[in-house]
């Protein structure tokens, strides 16, 4: 037990992976707001809304309940852009969570990425609130004080619960597929990729159908199931190479969903979730930083 406490005392979670993940959560929402009409997104008539919000906390809490859709959209965009600066995380964490909650509460169509961004932005509020940095893009200064050690222990445990939230998402998705006969026999891929709404674009559909109509279809569907179950299983993994392998496999998986189904606003929150989940020691930020300086 003492070894666990010593590890938590010296394990810094207050590093740049927090702001990096928050930026991916914010970017998914920005794409929705930038490229869609505010009235079509919310479909809320302010006059009619007055009769609905009296006993509805979720609508009362939404930015789109306080302002007209264009103004609310503008406020949301400015808040999310402010998140990218990394400044004042103690304040921006509340504002970011407010935006994601407003999207879930007020938009006509909400998909899994919106819900994940909402959940994770709420869970990150305590972490950001006790972050001593003015700007989360900066490295936290090491301080051996007893307060910071106790803070690290508490938030080390709390951060594990955030990771558990992401792990359960993959567990639920993987186990849920096992109960579906079309996932077990591989036919699900053909039906989803040929769906007239969520199907693959025409220019790659012919190539995709060569796989989904072949004997490899069950192998592909079971590979997806094993990947999702594997992502859950590695919540306790400590090996850097294994963690980074599954991190890039997860990115490739969600990128393929974007290419085949067009769900780009789902991809970015999931990348943010993967950073929180698998990037234990700030590897992704350090790698991106190294690439940046090498290109300069």
Image (cartoon, rainbow, N blue to C red):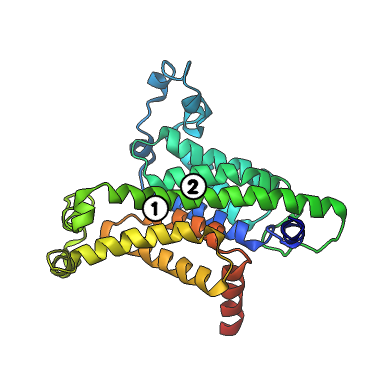
Residues under numbered marks 1 and 2 in contact, where contact means CB atoms less than 8 Å apart: no
**Upstream in the sequence, badge 1 or badge 2?**
2
- Across and down, in percent, residue 32 comes to 40, 49
Query: In terms of secondary structure, where does tag 1 sit?
Result: helix
- Across and down, in percent, residue 134 comes to 74, 54
Give the position of the N terminus as an image quadrant.
bottom right
Query: Image check: 183 left or right of 51?
Result: left
Query: Image check: 149 left or right of 239?
Result: right
Residue at the (46%, 46%) spot, across then down: 116
Instruction: Determine if residue 131 is in view.
Output: no
Give the position of the C terminus as an image quadrant.
bottom right
- Across and down, in percent, residue 191 comes to 16, 53
Q: How many marks?
A: 2
Report the front residue among 58 and 152. 152
Report the front residue among 171 and 115. 171
Above or below for 39 versus 18: above
Residue 18 shows which numbered tag? none
Residue at the (33%, 54%) spot, across then down: 263
Q: Residue furthest right?
A: 145
Question: Circle 2: is it few (<14), some (14-19), or many (20+) Cα within 10 Å?
Answer: many
Instruction: Determine if residue 173 is in view.
Output: yes
Report the front residue among 59 and 223. 223
Residue at the (48%, 27%) spot, across then down: 58
Question: Circle 1: is it few (<14), some (14-19), or many (20+) Cα within 10 Å?
Answer: many
Above or below for 206 versus 76: below
- Across and down, in percent, residue 280 comes to 61, 63
Residue 266 shows which numbered tag? 1
Query: In terms of secondary structure, where does tag 2 sit?
Result: helix
Q: What separation in Å lies between label 1 and label 2 (alpha carbons)?
A: 9 Å
Report the front residue among 208 and 43. 208
Residue matched to label 2: 117
Query: Image check: 38 left or right of 2?
Result: left
């Amino acid at each position: 037990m003492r070894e666990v406490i010593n590890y938590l005392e010296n394990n810094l979670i207050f590093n740049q992976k927090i702001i990096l993940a928050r930026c991916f959560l914010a970017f998914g929402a920005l794409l929705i707001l930038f490229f869609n009409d505010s009235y079509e997104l919310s479909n809320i008539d302010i006059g009619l809304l007055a009769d609905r919000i009296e006993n509805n906390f979720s609508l009362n809490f939404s930015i789109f309940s306080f302002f007209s859709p264009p103004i609310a959209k503008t406020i949301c965009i400015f808040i999310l852009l402010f998140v990218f600066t990394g400044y004042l995380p103690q304040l921006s964490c509340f504002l970011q969570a407010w935006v994601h909650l407003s999207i879930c509460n007020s938009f006509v169509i909400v998909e899994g990425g919106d819900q994940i961004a909402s959940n994770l932005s709420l869970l990150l509020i305590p972490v950001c609130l006790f972050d001593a940095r003015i700007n989360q893009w900066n490295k936290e200064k090491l301080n051996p004080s007893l307060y910071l050690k106790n803070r690290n222990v508490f938030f080390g445990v709390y951060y594990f619960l955030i990771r558990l939230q992401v792990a359960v998402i993959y567990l639920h998705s993987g186990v849920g597929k096992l109960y579906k006969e079309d996932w077990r026999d591989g036919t699900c891929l053909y039906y989803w990729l040929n769906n007239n709404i969520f199907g693959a674009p025409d220019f790659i559909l012919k190539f995709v159908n060569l796989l989904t109509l072949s004997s490899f279809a069950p192998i592909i569907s079971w590979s997806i199931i094993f990947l999702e179950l594997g992502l859950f299983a590695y919540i306790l993994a400590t090996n850097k190479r294994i963690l980074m392998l599954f991190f890039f496999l997860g990115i490739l998986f969600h990128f393929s969903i974007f290419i085949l189904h067009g769900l780009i606003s789902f991809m970015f929150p999931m990348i943010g979730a993967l950073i929180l989940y698998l990037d234990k020691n700030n590897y992704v930020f350090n790698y991106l930083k190294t690439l940046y300086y090498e290109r300069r």
